[in-house]
């Protein structure tokens, strides 16, 4: 169904007025479309990536190479989502491709060094590759948005790292 502003209540979940290109640490969760378990399975509390999950891992790790201002922290790819910590260093704006072009940042007006631009480029690349592998052009892989949390202190950072690392062990409780 095409977007209709009269019946669809789309609004930003971002913190109004916050510059998401600001130096800092961010905790992200990116979910698959309709929470489909595309990336592998958990057995004995260990996540086993399938070919789509391995593709997600390769593209995620490439993000720090393509975007020099990004440093990747802990992350886990789960059957239907990705949890990750991203660190933005605004003083490091040079690299292989500091302004990685994506459809989203070209047409939506996203600044190329923002968290949103990183996620848009990552999701676009993964979607294109997965759809090529399964011969399903245009089929959604990801939910429309993502969840983020600005990490404000070391205690919060440590709790989030623990949450990421224990996520496969807690999978049974969530399902």
Image (cartoon, rainbow, N blue to C red):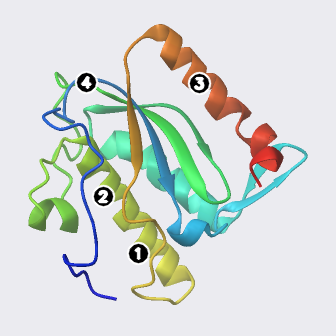
Residue 133, position as x, y percentages in the image: 55, 81
Please report whichever mark, 1 or 4, sits nearer to the chain's N-terminal start.
Answer: 4
Residue 23, position as x, y percentages in the image: 23, 23
Q: CA distance from mark 2 to mark 1?
A: 11 Å
Q: Residue at x 56, y 16 (%)?
A: 158
Q: Residue at x 70, y 38 (%)?
A: 167
The numbered mark at residue 89 is: 4
Count residues near mark 4 (Cα–Cα under 10 Å), then give few for <14, some for 14-19, many for 20+. Answer: some
**The one of 92 and 88 positioned closer to us in this rendering:** 88
Please report whichever mark, 2 or 4, sits nearer to the chain's N-terminal start.
Answer: 4
Please report whichever mark, 4 or 3, sits nearer to the chain's N-terminal start.
Answer: 4
Element marked by disc 2 = helix
Please report whichever mark, 1 or 3, sits nearer to the chain's N-terminal start.
Answer: 1
The quadrant of the image that shows the C terminus is: bottom right
Q: Mark 2 or mark 3: which is in front?
A: 3
Q: Which residue lies under the disc numbered 1?
A: 128
Q: Badges 2 and 4: C-beta atoms under 8 Å apart? A: no
Q: Badges 4 and 3: C-beta atoms under 8 Å apart? A: no
Element marked by disc 3 = helix
Q: Badges 1 and 3: C-beta atoms under 8 Å apart? A: no
Q: Which residue lies under the disc numbered 2?
A: 121
Q: Which residue lies under the disc numbered 3?
A: 161
Count residues near mark 1 (Cα–Cα under 10 Å), then give few for <14, some for 14-19, many for 20+. Answer: some
Please report whichever mark, 2 or 3, sits nearer to the chain's N-terminal start.
Answer: 2
| Quarter holding residue 150 | top left
């Amino acid at each position: 169904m095409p977007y209709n502003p009269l019946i669809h209540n789309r609004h930003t979940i971002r913190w109004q007025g916050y510059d998401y290109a600001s130096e800092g640490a961010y905790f992200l969760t990116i979910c698959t479309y309709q929470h489909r378990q595309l990336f592998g399975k958990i057995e004995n509390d260990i996540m086993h990536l399938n070919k789509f999950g391995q593709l997600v891992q390769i593209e995620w790790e490439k993000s720090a190479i393509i975007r020099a201002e990004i440093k990747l922290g802990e992350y886990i790819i789960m059957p239907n989502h990705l949890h990750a910590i991203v660190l933005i260093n605004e003083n490091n704006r040079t690299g292989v491709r500091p302004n990685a072009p994506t459809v989203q940042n070209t047409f939506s007006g996203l600044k190329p060094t923002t968290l949103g631009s990183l996620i848009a480029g990552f999701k676009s690349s993964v979607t294109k590759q997965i759809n090529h592998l399964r011969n399903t052009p245009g089929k959604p892989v990801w939910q429309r948005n993502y969840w983020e949390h600005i990490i404000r202190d070391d205690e919060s950072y440590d709790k989030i790292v623990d949450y990421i690392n224990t996520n496969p062990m807690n999978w049974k409780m969530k399902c």
